[in-house]
Image (cartoon, grey):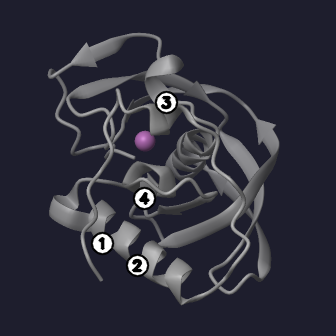
Amino acid sequence: MALREIVVDGDPILRKKSRPVEKFDDKLKILLDDMAETMYYDNRGIGIAAVQVGILRRAFVVDVGDEHGKLEFINPEIYEREGSALGMEGCLSCPGKNGYVERPTRIRVRAQDRNGEWFDMEATELLAVCICHEYDHLDGILFIDKVVEVEEDEFDDEEDGES
Ligand code: NI
């Protein structure tokens, strides 16, 4: 595993739409492992999308510290969204920024795992928020586009993490 460099806001790649993953090969597994290591490094993140390490593919990794542990989503589709709540978010690609974003409180998502097997799950609370945040990355959307109010360098991100 290796740390990868995180792309930060201002780089046009973050605004591009990621393409579906087609090959479930060793290269994908290395990418996912590297993404996780980069996310966990220095306890910085609770989620990371492939585009954040410069790879325009529809894949992300999340670990919000709940009972699910680390989860990998390849070619995901959020097909149900329910409820609405405001929560504080940050993003590894937007250092020093936090802000409140409105997200669903419950979602259903289907995706492929690293072997190409499809799975389907329900997510609530922080996990739902994190999946929605990462899902947006796949379409070139950043949380700062949706934020109610951005706070710069005022918030310690330890509680909610960055993704
Ligand atoms: Ni993010």
Q: Residues within 10 Å of mark 4 (few under 14, many from 20)?
A: many
Classify residue 1 as left or right of residue 130: left
Alpha carbon of mark 4 to alpha carbon of mark 1: how far? Answer: 14 Å
Residue indicated by mark 1 = 37
Q: Quadrant of ligand 1?
A: top left
Tag 2 residue:
33
Q: Secondary structure at mark 3?
A: loop
If you read the primary sequence from the N terminus, does the residue marked by circle 3 or circle 1 appear first?
A: 1
Q: Where residue 142 is drawn, which disc sits there?
A: 3
Q: Which mark is residue 78?
A: none
Q: Position of residue 77 (x, y in %)?
A: 78, 53
Q: Whole-percent x and y of residue 126?
A: 50, 47
Of marks 4 and 1, the one in the foreground = 1
Q: Closer to the N terminus: mark 4 or mark 2?
A: 2
As rendered, which of 125 and 133 lies closer to the eye?
133
What amino acid does circle 3 point to?
Leu
> In the rendered image, which quarter is residue 17 located in?
top right
Task: Give above or below for 84 relative to 119.
Answer: above
Give the residue at x 38% y 64%.
Answer: 65
Q: Residue 123: where, in percent of width, then height?
A: 66, 55
Q: CA distance from mark 3 to mark 1?
A: 22 Å
